[in-house]
Image: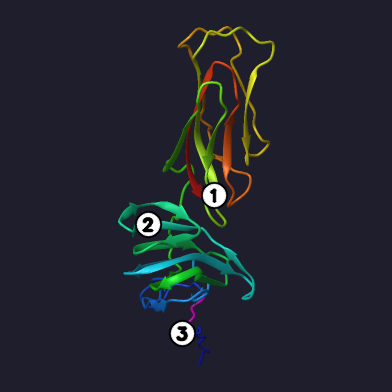
Amino acid sequence: MSAILYDARGNEIRLGFPDSVTNETVTDPRPITAVLGALNAEVIMDLNGAAVASFDVRTAVGALSFIFEGTRDGVNYFPLAAFAESSLIAATISAEVYVGTVVVATTITATYTVGVSGWRRVRLRISAYTSGNITVAARASRADLLIYSRPYPSTLHVTATGASGAAVTATLASAGAGLFHYITKIHLVQFVVAARTAAATPVLATTTNLPGSPIYSCDATVGAVGQIFQYDLTPINPLKSLLAATATTFVGPATTSTIWRWNISYYVGA
């Protein structure tokens, strides 16, 4: 008689092989459900070769934040990006966007999917707590599921317009733990508000938190009032920010007789 292995929840471990009778990969249909209402309260799942983990998160009243984390050695945890399939947070609807830290001010009804291939365990943990609780139902599956595909449609946009002769900065706020900015389009407008003379060197627009710290050379020729110079950069592949959980900035310098405007389209991901 062959030995049968079971996981911590009593499920038979089949090591990813199809069931000999149904010819289907076994997926545990029972959810793990818990109510979390304290700092560092958590829901943990052992993965047993699972490819994805799904979390249903709900509360009527709560002021807290939570994150998703994975571990390979069972001790050290690292932040994981979660794909918000659909969510309703304080009456603001968002769909199909990556999240790191989720901040709940009052209510939340949301579902999240996390890619967990290669991890030993995954957890949802309350990382900041003031009051209330969340009810979490979680399950993992060995089924193949496409979590995301780049290039991904831009879901976020930042516009920044300066005053005459003043510098202006467009800031992409930190995306959260473990998440980067993926920039799909950069549009810069240089508007002339007073007649200007030519300069011997270009005007330089700078950036932070991008690989190589790109600098863009802008027009320095004779300009008439009302003249517009526009610069567009649409990368073939999205431009990934250098550091996760860090703001990315685009800076138009203080330039006489000039109004700057930045338009930045992007999304966030791991």
Gap between marks 3 and 1, in whole Å? 38 Å
Check disc 1 and report the residue beneath it. 174
Name the front one of labels 1 and 2: 1
Q: Earlier in the sequence, mark 1 or mark 2?
A: 2
The boundaries of the magenta stretch are: 9-15
Whether residue 41 is situated above or below residue 200 in the rendered picture? below
Location of residue 243 with respect to 144 vertically, above or below = above
Label 3: element kind: loop
The x and y percentages for residue 106 are 36, 64
N-term-proximal mark, 3 vs 1 = 3
Q: Main secondary structure of the magenta part?
A: loop
How many angstroms separate mark 3 from mark 2 (CA)? 27 Å
Q: Which mark is residue 9?
A: 3
Q: Name the residue: 63% across, 44% down.
A: 242
Q: Name the residue type under label 2.
A: Glu
Of the two numbered discs 3 and 1 in the rendering, the one whose residue sits closer to the viewer:
1
- Work out whether residue 194 or residue 77 is closer to the camera in this orientation and state it: 194
Q: Which mark is residue 85?
A: 2
